[in-house]
Image (cartoon, rainbow, N blue to C red):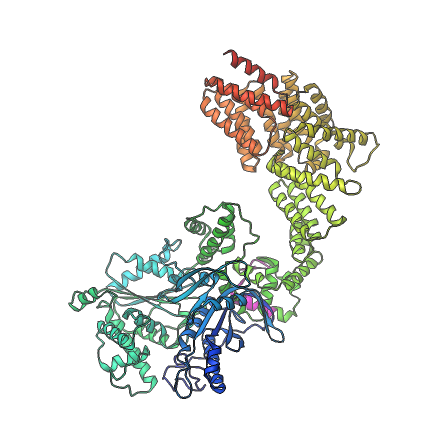
Amino acid sequence: MFCTQCGVRAMAPSRFCGQCGARLPVPVPAPEAPAREISRRQMTVLFCDLVGSTTLAEALDAEDLFEALRAYHTLVKRIAVRFNGHVAKVVGDGVDVYFGYPMANEDDAVRAIHAGLAIVEGIGSLAGPDGKPYGLGVRVGLATGRVTVGQTDTLAIAGATPNLAARIQAEAQPGQVLVSPVTRRIAGPQFDYDDLGPVALKGFADPVRLSAVAGVKGFNSRSAWRGRDGALPMIGRERELARLRQAWEACRHGPGEAVLVMGEAGLGKSRLATALAESLHDEPHLVIRLQCSPFHTNSVLYPFVQHLMAAAGFARHDSPQAQIEKLEAQLAIAGISEPQDLALMASLLDIPVDGRYPPLEMPPPARLQLAGELLVRYFAELTSQVPMVSTEALLALYFRGVTRSKPLLIVFDDLHWIDPSSLELLDKLLSTARLQHTLFVLTARPGFEHCFPPQARVPTIELRRLDAGQSRQMVAQLCHAIDLPASSVDLILSKTDGIPLFIEEMTRMVQDVQGVRSGLGLGSAGLGVPDTLLDLLTERLDRLGPAKALAQAAAALGQTFPTDLLAAVAQLPATTFEDQLNRLLASGLLLPHGPGQLKFKHALVENTAYDTTLLKTRVALHGRVVECLQGEFAALAQGAPELLAHHLARANRALEAARYLLQAGVQSLQGGAPREAAEHLKAGLQALQGVAEGPARAEVELGLLSVLGPTTMVLMGPGSAQFGEVQKRAYALCQSLPGKPRQFPITYGLCLYHWGRAEFDQALPLAQQLLHTANAIECGELDLGVAPHEAVMAACNMNGMIAFHRGESVQALAHLQRSVSLYQPERDAALYPVYLMDFGIFGRFYLALAHMACGEAEAAQQHALDAYTLAQRLNQPHSLGFSMLANFNIAVMRQEPEVALRFAEQCVAFSTQFGFPEFIGMARIVRGWATARRGQPEQGLADLEEGVRLWQSTGFENWQTWFVCLKAEILAELGRREQAVLEIDEQLERIQRNQERQFLPQLQRWRAALATG
């Protein structure tokens, strides 16, 4: 055991250091450390190296050099132990220290920087047996990153982080601590830095921005360390703040009180105490913050010592003389001026007094007891005096007596890290009747247990997680730089479980990614755990000991899962499984979630458990999950092929995963969810990227493309570039495979794309090929696995549409009548997932248009109404949208603006809900025309123009001649005849290019009418 004050090795039975008299650390049972097996984790690596070792070797005798190196190594090891680091490698004068292995700490990066500063400070004091300093100097470099580390024959580590730390060290000046950008970001504003800018490092492609640590900042709360104190308004803690305010009002004119604020890490305990202090700014009061530290759980009276040093205004380079003078001034505020008292406090702060006071001739326990009594007196006096502040002017005012009594707020943060002596002193402070008008706000995490003195009533406020509304409000408050889309906000909320710290760090990470992606939406893929939280979450997992592996197995199952499935996947003996599961439940990382179900308490804990699992272990775990879901637990995967696909993909069985994703896509389409279908199908194609070329891969890819094509048509429109890319790839793949599988529907899709683009010279040959094939199938001359009625319906439908737009109305009518006559709703419902088009509804839409073009208005209206009635019965959203298009277009052609307006407004609302942009565009065009007909031409024109813009954005090129006919009518009414003529002339040129002649007569009539005036 080492003394934490002077570093001298102490005898175990002793309670006090024989060298300096400080209380020795109290042995605390350590959490069960995980076996030093290979693991993935975030780690901070400290690399330090002596300066001028070659010169030193020349100047010293070999034996003296050996002793100097041994002293240096001992110093580094002792400091590493103090800050929970692990000395991994000592090679000559270079030492590697790992922070985060074998046990993580929530603040490993901070510990590493403190260790680096301590090494730099301590190296100069190393001296030989004769007391003569060795004159050693050291350079320190730190880097943080993901590594794989573990014990094989020796401790091995893989990853760029150790090399980066070494390269950073090489850039340091003697006595300098340099850190990587990640280390600085994780450590936060706890230190002052000098930014050195980007530096080219050997072996690294891009320059690395380095920072030199200039010193430690004197923050007095954990939330201030993170830069969060008072930065933004607090959310969701109004009730708790009101309780603290009530306690404050009670103690302002009466005896002291105390309140304990309990809550897990990140819930905002310190921030709540800060909010209370901020709320008192308009009334007389004093605030003192005492901060416990995870680095000083056995440092005697650490929070009190730190307060005295900060309150007295100690500076880093103050001489002992200056420190003594500042301490005397501070203690004088509380009336403490006796030489022995001052000597006791100087001893507590480890300040050399050099004969200034009489020597303290008492044993260490007596010193400690008297120092505690002095501190009680000090705080009691502060309730009627004003403590020293940093300006001489205010201090002078105090000594002239310009003071008045003020109530005192003492915030004592993080009692779960308090040292025994400080806890004992806290009990005395709470018990003393002398401490009037004082409110103690104590904060601690769950697991802190202490029986406060009976006379001290200490009620508890338990902080809860924010609810969904409060969490969303916090994200909105944080997003001042980048306006995050709703999907990104939902992603943040799903991962952070209402914990303010998690919300803050996850929002920052998503904002960073959002900025890099320039406004593109985010998916959950690729967004892991913020590196600022990884150490905290990994520490919780490491404390599980052997049960950590069970947590990692659970993480492979997801956030919620059945207990018996976890048991089957873990493959542990029953008693071992029960013991480890109980440990997980006791830790609070897993929670019961209904009968036979378990749930991770936090999504980020699940993510961390999964992220720290070795890749080969993940593959094995997912493989076992697949075996279970295809065997004993098949009922869990029934109707959820995407679940099996997920585990197959992560078990490196990509081809099987793609097959299940194809099933999931078809299932989503049948359920009327094209967006979800598209995501499944795209994921299937992505999974195939790692599969070798071959017939099996090509077959699955073609299956995915053949469904993704129609799905993309529904979501993006037949003229969209995305739809065209899918159909062209599918058509080329189909043509390259033996037997040309799925040739008919794929050819139909490619033809549909060219039709949407008004590329009739390319669409017509494909349509004629379809008709020739359909006739051959109908005659029994060809078998492509397509039913005769399906082939004829599809081919005639496509030929009818193309004929209509080319102005061949009679031919269009014949094709469309033949297609619709073959349609049977119940039988042909199965064709919808193949074409994403119901030929009974879409066929009637174009059949109505063909009748109208042939002068048969009544028949046209009836077919449009029949399409609407049928679509309502079938409950296919895309088909229902088509039926609305049929009715409002026929209504326009029949000059019935009220009917057109009714169907157009219904279509806008419906299509907005389901995300059909081309339907919205056409509906707004018609709504604009109807609005103009009702006497509002300006409003109608604006709506129409926005509809045209939206229609064009989907890639559609057809129908635009018709839109200009409607627009010309409004422009004429507004007296803007020249503009109308220009736009008509543009469309006449378009017709020359693409041969879309259906609306040529109407354009010519309008052109003539406008020309004659």
From where the camera sits, is residue 823 visible? no
Residue 438: image location, x then y, percent:
28, 67
Seen from the viewer's position, the closer of residues 331 and 257 is 331
Vertical side of 268 occupied by 47: above or below = below
In this image, 289 relative to 785: left or right? left
Vertical side of 500 occupied by 895: above or below = above
Residue 966, quarter of the rendered image: top right
Query: Which portion, as a residue range, is magenta?
Result: 578-600
Residue, far top: 1012
In this image, 729 relative to 48: left or right? right
Residue, far left: 400
- The question of residue 847 being in magenta is answered with no
- The question of residue 587 being in magenta is answered with yes
* Residue at x-position 53% and y-position 33%: 909
Seen from the viewer's position, the closer of residues 141 and 881 is 141
Vertical side of 366 occupied by 865: above or below = above
In this image, 553 relative to 291: left or right? right
Residue 392: image location, x then y, percent:
21, 66
Residue 649: image location, x then y, percent:
66, 55
